[in-house]
Image: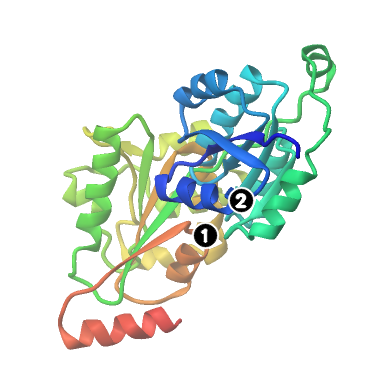
Amino acid sequence: MGRNRLVMIIDPEADSRSSVTGLLRDAPFAVVADAGYGEDAAAIADEAQPEIVLAAVEEPVEDALRTIAQIAATLPQAVIVGYSSLTEMRLIRQVLQSGIRDLLPRPLDQSELLAALDATEGVPPVSVATAAQAPAPAPVPTRGTVLAVFGAKGGIGKSTIATSHAASIALDTDRSVLVMDMDTRFGDIAIMLDMEPRFTISDVAQHADSLEPEGFHRALMEHESGAFVLAAPKHPSEWANVTADQMKAIVEFAAQQFDYVILDTPGTFNDIVATSIEVADRVLVISSLDMASIKDTVHMLDL
């Protein structure tokens, strides 16, 4: 009987690492190390010297790929197999271009996982010379996380939660954050933060098909917390000139510029709200405890 091949698991969730370890139990693989994302993972890999690195690739994707790149540089002889819940083709291409040998969908199927690991048997190591000669893949822009804050009625704290989240991220992390006031009725983000906007979403929407970083940042306001704000139009009537497609283009562009984009939406369901939910990675649903709010929230969840 041959020896067990050495495996290291990279996953930001400790419970997930434990579950993956369980899938490899009674198989010809030995888990010799595990770690989350970050520079420590490469040091642990260097000490453990695994033959296979089994890596979760989840948001924020840039952290995952940075960790994988550090391990690949430390252990060029190791084969890297990824697993992910990502479904966007652009992100999947980005992952595969990073040098991962195979990418498995989550939740992991044990037989599929073992087959993928068995397929790495005999895969030759990548030499430093070969890696140096290989053409570097074209850089793929990273995308920040988009969070839509939604509630089925007004006055339940959506704007307060959106601004608090943005300020907390700016103050407590090294991540960049933008909060966009997409309340098509009464956008209050600017006044809540005691700010007077020179430009608003309606101004940016006029150039939605030709956005560029410098001009986009000129339309933003920076709060003392470090969070940036793109204010709602000063008059609700100005929303009539803003289309859902324009808002989608603005949000996607903003996500290329910031680590987090937080969308504050109105207490109703319209095309702008539908677009916000469509492009969001996560939707935070706010409700109060009165019967009307609960009823409307249930209807929104059905949608």
Name the one closer to the observer, 243 or 169: 169
Viewer-proximal residue among 87 and 122? 122
Element marked by disc 1: helix
Q: Position of residue 214 (x, y in %)?
A: 50, 31
Crowding at mark 1 (Cα within 10 Å: few <14, some 14-19, many 20+): some
The quadrant of the image that shows the N terminus is top right
Badge 2: residue crowd in 10 Å (few <14, some 14–19, many ≥20): few
Q: Check disc 1 and report the residue beneath it.
A: 279
Going by the image, does 112 lie left or right of 161? Answer: right
Q: Quarter holding the C terminus?
A: bottom left
Q: Is residue 188 visible?
A: no
N-term-proximal mark, 2 vs 1? 2
Total numbered badges shown on the rendered structure? 2
Q: For the point 79% across and 18% down, which residue is it?
A: 131
Q: Which residue is mark 2?
A: 26
Left or right, 43 with respect to 75, comes to: left
* 162 left or right of 194 in image: right
* Vertical position of residue 67 compared to residue 258: above or below: above
Three-letter code for the amino acid on which mark 2 is drawn: Asp
| Residue 199 appears left or right of 257 | left
Point out residue 82 in the picture as x, y percentages from the top left corner. 64, 43
Q: Position of residue 170 (x, y in %)?
A: 29, 35
Q: Residue at x 45, y 67 (%)?
A: 272
Q: Quadrant of residue 51?
A: top right
Is any part of residue 73 visible from this angle? yes
Q: Viewer-nearest of labels 2 and 1?
A: 2
Residue sitting at 21 percent across and 32 percent down?
224
**Residue 144: x %, y % from top left:** 49, 43
Residue type at mark 1 is Val
Q: Give me the residue at 58% from left, 34% from top.
A: 65
Front-most of residues 15 and 129: 15
